[in-house]
Image (cartoon, rainbow, N blue to C red):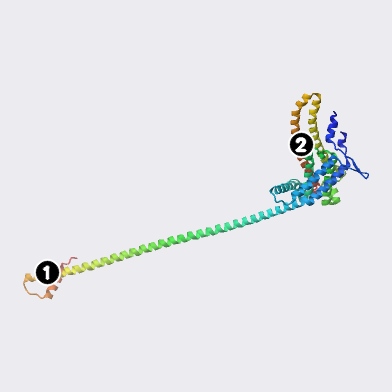
Amino acid sequence: MNVADTIAHHILDHNWGITLAGFHLPVTTHSVTILGVSVFLFIGLIWAARPHASRAGRLITTLLEEYVTFIRDGLVLPNLGAEGRSFLPYFCTLFLFILSVNLAGMIPEMKTATSNISVTAALALCSGGLILYGGLKYHGLIGFIKGFVPTGTPAWLVPLIFPLEVISTVIKVCVLAIRLFANMLSGHMVLICLLLIIFIVGHMQIFAGVGALIPAMGLEIFMTCLELLVAFLQAYVFTLLTAIFTGSVIHTH
Amino acid sequence: MGDLLKPDFGVTFLTICNFLLLVYLLKKFAWKPIISALEKREQQIAHDKEQAQQARQAAQQLQAELEEKLNQVAQTAAQKMAEAIKRGQDQRDQLLADAQAQAERLVAQAQAQIEAEKNQALADVRAEIVRTAILAAKQVVREELNADQTRETVERVLNEVKPK
């Protein structure tokens, strides 16, 4: 048994490789998962946003309103100020999207697409685009570029500070992608490794494998609970950091 | 395992398109109605709160006015009560004085009446004494005297013997 191949099979994306008219469509496990989550969110949220006559429907609408209030008052307004109101739909979608994709891995036959660097890079690029858009919208091109140099910086330091600040912003965006990817990947790797303990020990001694079943499953349940927490936490961290970075370019030094 | 960090630009591109399309669609069909309903309700709550505060201020002002009026009424009532008590005391004093004067007048009248009756009684007694004395004198001197002279004599005698 090749343990590394087993882990890789569980973690890695599977490209089904559909090529149409010479164009390779990236139909992969993760992209299909993302599409499924998007359709689910789209249908579910549109249904929830409708006026409801039933008590359960009103409860869901109220929960959704509470969610929007949480994003607005907890993340957007404190970091972006009143200007952030126009970005509220983006942040509402971002948190729910990342959370749903994170949690999708808990469903059998579905994958955690955020454990794919390509997916988290895409989300980070969107956040980078938002940061850029916010800076250009409120300060213009010149103002946005000037914003990279803190007020009061001596002129001779500007050539040093400016590239550093630009690189810092780019790194921040890259770190967004890497943090989400690494956290979600590591959780799933730990989960599969704990499961593999049973098979590895069982491969050596069948009764030892049976004996390892209970502690391994206990750890598995513990890690699954931890993964649930990490799914929420990482969605929150990604959204919060995006809000902070966007706010920092809107409200410069 | 080396594929873990190998980016798939197709997936990245698809994810960006997927996510941005989702943002657009949800913004249009889900978040917009929810946010507008939320803001409308918040505005309504803020408006209601403001109205409630205004009503509270009006009620507090009304309460202050009523308390002031109540104090004024209480002061007026106390003043009128004091005046009534004073008037009652004056009336009582007047009635007592009137009664005193009435009593004194009645006593004076009674004393005058008593004096008059006493004088009348004395006059009667005096007349009786005169008559008796005349009769006695008649008997003593056994001579006929003029009744008028006798009376004058007796009167003179009585005046002389009248206690001082």
Please tell me which residue lies in front, A122 or A101: A101
Residue type at tag 2: Glu
Q: Residue at x 61, y 57 (%)?
A: B58
Farthest residue in the right direction?
A: A22
Mark 1 lies on residue = B132
| In this rendering, position of residue A138 left or right of residue B60 | right
Residues flagged by tags 2 and 1 on a common chain: no
Please tell me which residue lies in front, A231 or A59: A59
Per the rendering, the mark at residue A139 is none
Secondary structure under the numbered disc 1 in the rendered image: helix
Q: Residues within 10 Å of mark 1 (few under 14, many from 20)?
A: few
Q: Are marks 2 and 1 in contact (CB under 8 Å)?
A: no
Residue type at tag 1: Thr
Mark 2 lies on residue = A227
- Picture coordinates of residue B92, whole percent (x, y): 38, 62
- Picture coordinates of residue B160, whole percent (x, y): 16, 68
Secondary structure under the numbered disc 2 in the rendered image: helix
Residue A148 visible in the picture: no
Please tell me which residue lies in front, A26 or A149: A26
Which tag is nearer the camera, tag 2 or tag 1?
A: 2
Q: Residue at x 57, y 57 (%)?
A: B63
- Picture coordinates of residue B52, whole percent (x, y): 64, 55
Image quadrant in which you'd find residue A162: top right
| In this rendering, position of residue A66 left or right of residue A10 | left
- Chain ID at mark 2: A
Mark pair 2, 1: CA separation: 155 Å
